[in-house]
Image (cartoon, rainbow, N blue to C red):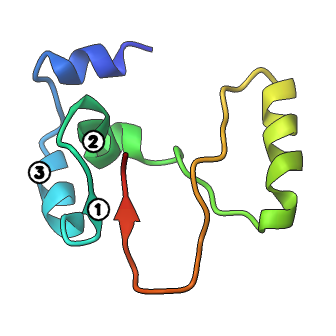
Amino acid sequence: AGALALTDAGHGSSLAPANRAATSARINGTEDGLMALLHDPQTGGGLLAAVPADQAAALLAALMAAGERASIVGAVVAGASRIAVI
């Protein structure tokens, strides 16, 4: 809680710029607070999990039943490697 407000206020990890540089060719999107959190090592880890598509809905339901905020944010598809943050 409060991570977005802190990043919007200009706070961030010293490692975030290196993470941004390492992924800039593969992640597209507007450089805003959410993008900054994606690159911050303290908020970027554990935010995304890849699971088989046929298990995603059940996992989502289990996480939500446990009181976690969770959502399906994308899918792995055939093609060139890239990530688009919208």
Marked residue nearer the N-terminal end (2 or 1): 1
Q: Amino acid at mark 3?
A: Pro
Callout 1 touching callout 3 (CB < 8 Å): no
Callout 3 touching callout 2 (CB < 8 Å): no
Marks 1 and 3 sit apart, C-alpha to C-alpha, by: 14 Å
Q: Of 3 and 85, which appears nearest the observer?
A: 85
Q: Which mark is residue 27?
A: 1
Residue placed at 21% from the left, 57% from the top?
Answer: 19
Mark yes or no: residue 15 visible: no
**Residue 71: horizontal and vertical position, in percent?**
66, 38
Marks 2 and 1 sit apart, C-alpha to C-alpha, by: 9 Å
Q: Is residue 83 above or below residue 77?
A: above
Callout 2 touching callout 1 (CB < 8 Å): yes
Residue placed at 40% from the left, 80% from the top?
Answer: 81
**Residue holding disc 2:** 35
Marked residue nearer the N-terminal end (3 or 2): 3
Quadrant in the picture for residue 22: bottom left
**Residue 79: horizontal and vertical position, in percent?**
48, 86
Q: Amino acid at mark 1?
A: Ile
Local crowd size for mark 3, using a 10 Å CA cut-off: few (<14), some (14–19), many (≥20) = few
**Residue 26: horizontal and vertical position, in percent?**
28, 70
Q: Is residue 22 above or below residue 33?
A: below
**Residue holding disc 3:** 17
Residue placed at 58% from the left, 56% from the top?
Answer: 74
Q: Secondary structure at mark 3?
A: helix
On screen, residue 19 versus residue 38, left or right, reads left
Marks 3 and 2 sit apart, C-alpha to C-alpha, by: 12 Å
Q: Secondary structure at mark 2?
A: helix
Local crowd size for mark 1, using a 10 Å CA cut-off: few (<14), some (14–19), many (≥20) = some
Q: Amino acid at mark 2?
A: Met
